[in-house]
Amino acid sequence: MRRASSMFALLFAAFACFAQPEKPLLLRNPSVSGTQIVFSYAGDLWIVNRQGGMPHASHQLTDERFNGGGDIADYIVDYLRRPLLSYWTMREGDDIRTPIEGIFGPKVMITNEMAGSGGEAMPWLFRKAGIGTLVGKRTRGGLVGHYTNPQDLIDGGFTGTPNLAFYTPESKWEIENHGVDPDVDVELDPAQWRQGHDTQLEKAVQVVLEQLQKNPPPVRKHPGYPNCYVSTSVVARSK
């Protein structure tokens, strides 16, 4: 598994084989940037919001295309599947929740045929944990790992010796030589990309917004405050 500069990229991934638009694609698209979708690059999270600030995000798109791997990022899956556990009312300010950091609406992950090794483990774990929908193309089928390397070659190349192979708790070999299939199969059209359209991204946005309509995140309902001022006569009679 080769080391990658980022195991976790949420939208705005850099695509080496295509020219970049002058501005970030999502910010140029009002129908996308007007929504509260979480975006990240190299593990940094932010939310597209025209008014600035950091509102609570209701849904999430994870873009892990071109992810060359380097690690098994199960910790990312742990964060993505955090359930809403409780709320806390505050003497000052708005209520907070537990966990404070969490997105409790629908989630979609985009992947493609250039994602490999640990970049294939990520969508597999995403699906195994029941987090959301995979959009894009089947990954390349190269999830093997090695921790020993023979001598580098005289021409500057190197060889790798596989030491790790993946199988499931159900005793099945998976991913290697096949990859991870998407739930929604979408090509990344180079001609459309040069016109300013990312067909896989746009489909993922469509899917997550449709899911948001069908399964909106939970709405906080503050209970009425209890009456703690009970008279002493009532307490005496109750005894």
Image: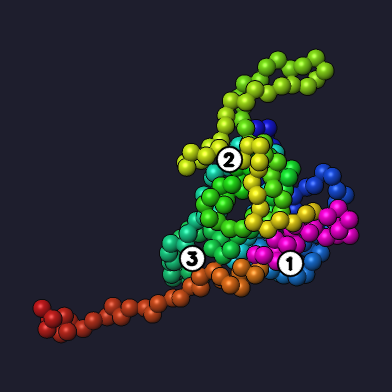
Q: Earlier in the sequence, mark 2 or mark 3?
A: 3
2 and 3 marks in contact (CB < 8 Å): no
Can residue 39 be found in the magenta stretch?
no
Query: Which of the image's four quarters has the C terminus?
Result: bottom left
Residue tagged 2: 174
Can residue 206 be found in the magenta stretch?
yes
Residue tagged 3: 96
Q: Which residues are magenta?
A: 189-208
- Would you say 95 lies left or right of 21 here? left
Q: Earlier in the sequence, mark 3 or mark 1?
A: 1
What amino acid is found at the position of numbered circle 2 in the picture? Answer: Glu
Compute the Cα span from label 2 to label 3: 41 Å
Residue tagged 1: 32
2 and 1 marks in contact (CB < 8 Å): no
Q: Is residue 22 something that shows in the picture? A: no
What amino acid is found at the position of numbered circle 3 in the picture? Answer: Ile
In the image, residue 220 sits, relative to residue 178, either above or below, namely: below
Q: Position of residue 70 (x, y in %)?
A: 64, 35
What amino acid is found at the position of numbered circle 1 in the picture? Answer: Val
Compute the Cα span from label 3 to label 1: 27 Å
**Looking at the image, which residue is at 50% across and 56% down?**
82
Instruction: Name the one closer to the observer, 50 or 139.
Output: 139
Q: Position of residue 54 (x, y in %)?
A: 63, 63
